[in-house]
């Protein structure tokens, strides 16, 4: 656990990271950058990347042969691998272990039944890789105040954190922020294609779309204005933007499509919980 300062440098006991792929690896990078002692970290992953292997000389233990319960267990596996890895995960957990899961669709009850410990279920997103992620977390009733502070510090190492009390919200969270980066990348992809269709050279259309989406995202991040106000600030009555928005905001437009998309992702998250 960590002291009231919520500094990762103050974490006591071993921390086991199960799954060091893109998200798990991004979290680990953030933890070490914020002062977590590498010697306290154990990484469990049968397919370690070269980047993760470079951490071994710094003290991070990779796939040690003799598992024992840890103070904190972070599960960053693909949901489909959860039950396959159950026996290994349980070896690193005890009734005193804080278990933080970032697996989509895997409920607190499932984690308690399979892994044990005091469970925090969280849903980050891929901008965590650059420290700009947003994570939503919900804690089981057995999680202590100190354990929640530890989980918050671990999750906050890759961006912002929001806590909710109702686990039922996590499916919609997954659909909005967990899957959301893919929607934004698709916007850049399709905007570039539209530019090409309008006569732009492919390389220029791609550059314009990419920089427009990323720059607009940064403006949204820095501005205190609502997104609707920022949109209105770009839109002159009867102008080119208004003409485009008449299509995007018309019947069957972006709002309708986005509502259907988020509903589909939410339903899929609920299905994963039943598997």
Image (tube, rainbow, N blue to C red):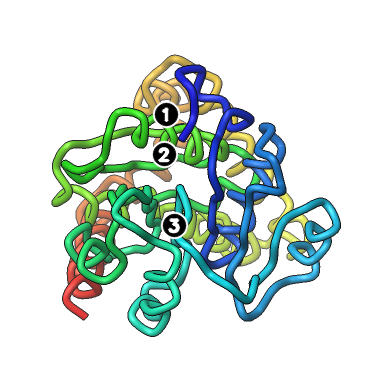
Question: In the figure, 191 relative to 150: above or below?
Answer: below
Q: Position of residue 6 (x, y in %)?
A: 50, 24
**What is the CA distance from the residue labelled 1 to the residue labelled 2?**
36 Å
Numbered label attached to residue 183: 3
Asked if marks 3 and 2 touch (Cβ < 8 Å), the reply is no
Q: Position of residue 251 (x, y in %)?
A: 20, 53
Locate residue 204 relative to residue 235 in the image: left or right.
Answer: right
Which residue is depicted at the point 44% across and 35% down? 150
Residue marked by disc 2 = 151
Numbered label attached to residue 129: none
**What is the CA distance from the residue labelled 3 to the residue labelled 2?**
28 Å
Locate residue 153 relative to residue 58 in the image: left or right.
Answer: left
Which residue extends farthest top? 224
Within-10-Å neighbours for mark 1: few <14, some 14–19, many 20+: few
Q: Position of residue 122 (x, y in %)?
A: 35, 49
Q: Nearer the viewer, residue 156 or 95?
A: 95
Within-10-Å neighbours for mark 2: few <14, some 14–19, many 20+: many
Locate residue 272 relative to residue 102 in the image: left or right.
Answer: left
Question: In the figure, 265 relative to 218: above or below?
Answer: below
Do we see residue 260 in this rendering?
no
Q: Mark 1 or 2 closer to N-term?
A: 2
Numbered label attached to residue 231: 1
Q: Mark 1 or 3 closer to N-term?
A: 3
Q: Secondary structure at mark 1?
A: helix
Mark in front: 1 vs 2 = 2
The quarter holding residue 132 reads top right
Q: Position of residue 80 (x, y in %)?
A: 37, 80
């Amino acid at each position: 656990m960590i002291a009231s300062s919520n500094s990762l440098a103050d974490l006591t006991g071993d921390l086991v990271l199960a799954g060091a792929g893109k998200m798990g690896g991004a979290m680990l990078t953030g933890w070490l950058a914020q002062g977590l002692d590498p010697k306290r970290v154990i990484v469990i992953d049968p397919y370690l990347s070269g980047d993760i292997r470079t951490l071994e000389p710094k003290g991070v233990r990779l796939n040690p042969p003799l598992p024992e319960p840890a103070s904190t267990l972070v599960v960053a596996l693909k949901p489909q691998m959860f039950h396959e890895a159950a026996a290994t995960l349980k070896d690193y957990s005890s009734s005193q272990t804080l278990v933080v899961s970032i697996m989509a669709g895997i409920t607190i009850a499932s984690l308690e039944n399979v892994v044990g410990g005091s469970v925090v279920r969280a849903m980050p997103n891929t901008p965590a890789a650059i420290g700009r992620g947003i994570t939503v977390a919900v804690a089981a009733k057995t999680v202590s105040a100190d354990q929640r502070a530890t989980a918050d510090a671990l999750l906050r190492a890759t961006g912002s954190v929001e806590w909710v009390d109702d686990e039922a919200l996590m499916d919609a969270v997954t659909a909005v922020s967990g899957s959301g980066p893919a929607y934004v990348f698709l916007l850049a992809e399709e905007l570039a294609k539209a530019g090409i269709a309008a006569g732009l050279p492919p390389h220029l259309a791609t550059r314009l779309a990419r920089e427009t989406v990323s720059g607009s995202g940064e403006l949204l991040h820095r501005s205190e204005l609502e997104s609707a106000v920022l949109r209105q600030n770009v839109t002159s009555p009867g102008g080119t933007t208004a003409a485009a928005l008449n299509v995007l905001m018309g019947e069957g437009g972006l709002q309708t499509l986005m509502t259907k998309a988020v509903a589909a992702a939410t339903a899929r998250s609920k299905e994963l919980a039943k598997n």
